[in-house]
Image: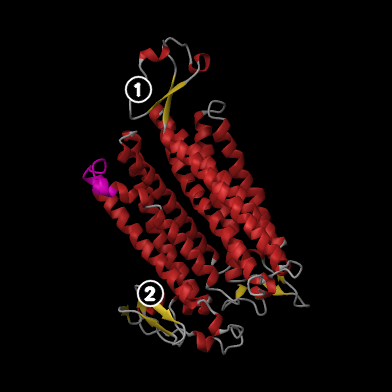
Amino acid sequence: MEAIFDVTLLSRLQFAFTAVFHYFFVPLSIGLGLILAIFETKAYRSRKPEDVAAAKFWVKIFTTTFAIGVATGITMEFSFGTNWADYSRFVGDIFGAPLAAEALFAFFLESVFLGVLVFGRNKVSPKFYMIAAWLVFFGSCLSALWILIANSWMQTPAGAELALDGSKAVISDFFAAAFNPSTVPRYGHTVTAVLTMGSFTCMAVGAFYLMKGRYQEFAKKAVKIGAAAGLVSTCVLLVFAHSSAVVVAEEQPTKLAMMEGMYESEAPDLYLFGWVDEESQEVITPFSIPGGTSFLATGSFDTEFPGLNDLAETDKYGDIVIEDLPVNLVFQSYHLMVAMFGMIALTLILAFLTLRKSKVASNKWVQRLLMISPLFPFVAIQSGWITAEMGRQPWVVYPSTSGPDGVSLLTIDGVSASVTGVEVAITLALFLAIYLLLFVAWIRLVSGLIKKGPEIEVAPAGAESADAAGLFSTGFGVGSASSKGGE
């Protein structure tokens, strides 16, 4: 019974659940923010009713997703003061600035101009409205920066020192802390990943309409724009993914060892897939490239990296207990992320081949692939975060290679001493129930918006203006309003 109501375990499960659920909506909102801005720019330039209808469609999808994302993100910040109070005391001097900046600068910027998009289409100039769309996207990216500054500091602490009484980390250099060794590559990696997911979602919506034979012109544009944005974001993603991996190799040796199932010091092999036998401490796989991971990290097949057994004997990483480390979980999540990147690349290749031959409107199996394609970046994103967060265990603040001495915190020491396991279990159950309701509500709302589709607003025949006579809608790509509509 004590194991079931273990405060540390339940607190980690609760935060993991809320983070994973929240991070379903964050990639969608940031990624669709770019799609929204592109369609709004197209509408501004062409002033065509069908382009305006398409832009309005994405505003509705984005707003619905943004609202759920905000609601589910608030609970995570509250948990810093409840389940993770001791952690907050340790990092509060560092975390206060980026979290406050995220709320004051990024969130306010994003929400204010989202208000313009929702309520101001006919109240501000078309140019200002288009700029508002780009500012919403910029605000979401800025929000991600501040959050990732905080999270990256947990991975590779810098610009701080341990207080004299050893109770907390004290900031000594704000810019060194903000731009710690992993901030830039992790930010680039994360943002390009979520832009890829937004692009694939755009393609999926277009493919859905092509399958249903509805809104054909909008559907083709959605697939083309999504494929183009997806290609650019994926190419940039590859660069930042490599940079992130290099930082892990240099700064987080225990994480790299778990990612590659490496217990002994060696030039790590490159595995396509496999299984880590944690008892025998070896990777079981039919295929590997000797020294492949070493080559990717350093350009040499012979560079050795320390294994978990050797690291456990050092002063810096002596807190790890080899038997308790989730080595196979980290190994599998990392390789699943890589496999999903392969599916992303394959999907883009097939999308461009069918677009080039103008067969995307008739090729049903490619349409089906595009409809499920957002799953590939979504799984890659979630498995990547599992790798990042589980890979730094048992620390919640990791003692990175270049990190200041003493600035680290074990996960078990970050949990609040005043919260009981029963209380965490009850709140976890409540979160499960409430989040389920929120997810069902979001599915119903978005499904209804997609079913309704992008609609052109036209004035009834004989009316002097749309504002004077009222508006009615017709699905663009299906047909246009007839003169009988005003009779």
Of residue 295 and residue 90, the one placed in the foreground of this image is 90
The mark that comes first in sequence, 2 or 1, is: 2
Neighbor class of circle 1 (other Cα within 10 Å; few <14, some 14-19, many 20+) is few
- Which of the image's four quarters has the N terminus? bottom right
| Residue farthest toward the right in the current orientation of the protein | 165
Query: What is the three-letter code of the residue carrying label 1?
Result: Ser
- Compared to 156, does 105 lie above or below? above
On screen, residue 407 versus residue 463, left or right, reads: right
- Identify the secondary structure beneath mark 1: loop
Examine the rendering and report whether any part of residue 348 can be seen. yes
Task: Give the residue drawn at x 54%, y 84%.
Answer: 322
Which residue carries the number 2 mark?
296
* Label placed on residue 480: 1
- Which of the image's four quarters has the C terminus? top left
Q: Position of residue 65 (x, y in %)?
A: 53, 45
Picture quadrant where residue 414 is located: bottom right
Task: Give the residue drawn at x 37%, y 20%.
Answer: 481
Of residue 167 and residue 272, the one placed in the foreground of this image is 272
Of residue 64 and residue 279, the one placed in the foreground of this image is 279
Query: What is the three-letter code of the residue carrying label 2?
Result: Leu
Of residue 175 and residue 395, the one placed in the foreground of this image is 395
- Identify the secondary structure beneath mark 2: helix
Q: Nearer the viewer, mark 2 or mark 1?
A: 1
Q: Magenta includes 251? A: no
Q: In the rendered structure, which segment of residues is drawn in magenta?
A: 354-366
Examine the rendering and report whether any part of residue 84 can be seen. no
